[in-house]
Each structure stands twice: as structure tokens, then as C-alpha cells.
Image (cartoon, rainbow, N blue to C red):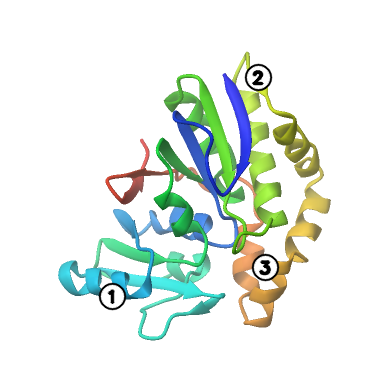
Amino acid sequence: MKITLSFEETISGDVSIMVDALRASTSITVALNNFKKVIPCFTPEEALELQERIGGVVAGERNGKQIEGFDIGNTPVGILNYESDEDTLILTTTNGTRILESMNSKVLVGSLVNAESVAKASCRLANDHIDVVMAGVKGKFAIEDYLAAGEILYQICESLDEYELSEYAKTAIMASRDYDALTEAFMNSRTSKRLIELGNIKDVEFSCQKNITENVAIFKNNELKLYI
């Protein structure tokens, strides 16, 4: 099995794992506790138009802030605790939902909170190539995505007997092995500092927990549902 790490665009036509640790991947993962599906939209206008047509809860952010007129922001803690009779979450974010649009492979959503589960799911689903794709922030590298990807890559390797691992992927695994150092880097990243300034420290703390859920989202027909 070929295992690689990429930035923004996947290099696999087989299985890709989208990683936007702060916060889209984490929000999508925990949303499946309360919603049957998550529909990503690429603009706020598209999200609101879709809500008008099909109902659902509309969630999202731009530059870390909840979008005006939306039910909730892109907040894993808020989404996890959100009470609604609706079974659909419509989500638009600055980075993660944008990355999903360009993937032409079987796509799973990964983060620190489901690293082990998404790794195992990718191994079951893949034929010959798993690519872990970091979303970054507006075209720039984000250390939190790199560290979350490292944990996912480590778990993939633990699940396989034979694999070919790219050197880029190897460095991410090495960087993620010291959890205390990972947590410190995660909490002090550029994205984290921005979110903390906006009053979202609980989201940051929640998102840097490892392997606390078995939820894995798979992207099919423009919808994210639980991979079973």
C-alpha cells in the first residue's frame, strides 16, 4: 500500500483523507453524533439557499467568525451540544469544505479526535494508495493539520503489514509522537491563537484530543455520512 501526505490537493485516485483539524474535520466528525448527514457548501449564499429548499441547520464561519444569519458557527463543541429535530447539517467553512470540492477519489474526513478510526477505515477502503491531505489555511501550511495528519498516518501504518511510506509522511509521524509537544504546538498555532482571540478556546482544546470518537465521515454525492 502506498501512503502519502499532501497539501490542499490529493495525489491519489484511490482513497484520500481530508484533514482540517481546526475546525472543519472535527466539526464534521462530531456532527454525525446528532445529524444523519452533513452537506458542505462552498459559499454562505449557497448554504442559505439550500436551507431554504430542504431545511436543516446551517453552520459555518469565515475567518473564524460565525456567519451572520447562520444557526451556529463552525464549532465542534457547539455542534456536538446543539439540539435540533433536523437531521441535516449544512456547513460552509473557509478551508475544509473548499478542499472537498476538488477531490476525485474516495474521501474520508480525519482529525485528531478520530485518527485511529479514520485510519482503519481508509485501510479497509483502499486498494493501493492512501493520501492524507492537509487543508491548511488560505493556501498556507497549518501545523495543526500536519500534526493531526501525523497521528492518522501512524495509525494507518499500525493497521498494515506492508506499506510504502513517503518521506513527507514519515516526518509528520515523527512530529506527532510526543503528545505533550503536539498539544503545545497545537494550542500555540497561528489558527489556535486566532480562535482563542475570538473566544473559541474550548474548540481548540476539544480538537487536540486524540481518538475520542469512532465516527468517520465519507463524502459521496456531495454529502458526508457515517462510514460503516
Q: Earlier in the sequence, mark 1 or mark 3?
A: 1
Residue furthest to the bottom: 68
First reached walking from the N terminus: tag 2 or tag 3: 2
Query: x, y percentage for residue 220?
Result: 31, 43
Inter-mark Cα distance, 2 to 3: 32 Å
Mark 2 residue crowding within 10 angstroms, few (<14) / some (14–19) / many (20+): few
Which residue is depicted at the point 64% across and 74% down?
A: 195
Q: Does residue 195 appear anywhere in the picture?
A: yes
Between 159 and 108, the residue placed more toward the observer is 108
Q: Residue at x 67, y 67 (%)?
A: 191
Q: Amino acid at mark 2?
A: Glu
Type of amino acid under label 1: Leu
- Residue extending furthest toward the top: 162
Asked if residue 83 shows in the view, the reply is: no
- Which label was assigned to residue 191? 3
Q: Residue at x 76, y 56 (%)?
A: 183
Determine which quarter of the picture holds residue 201.
bottom right
Q: What is the distance, in whole Å, between disc 1 and disc 3 at their CAs?
A: 26 Å
Residue tagged by mark 2? 164
Residue at 64% over, 43% down: 149
Task: Say what secondary structure mark 3 lies in.
Answer: helix
Q: CA distance from mark 1 to mark 2?
A: 44 Å
Quadrant the C terminus occupies: top left
The residue wearing badge 1 is: 48
Q: Is residue 47 left or right of residue 95?
A: left
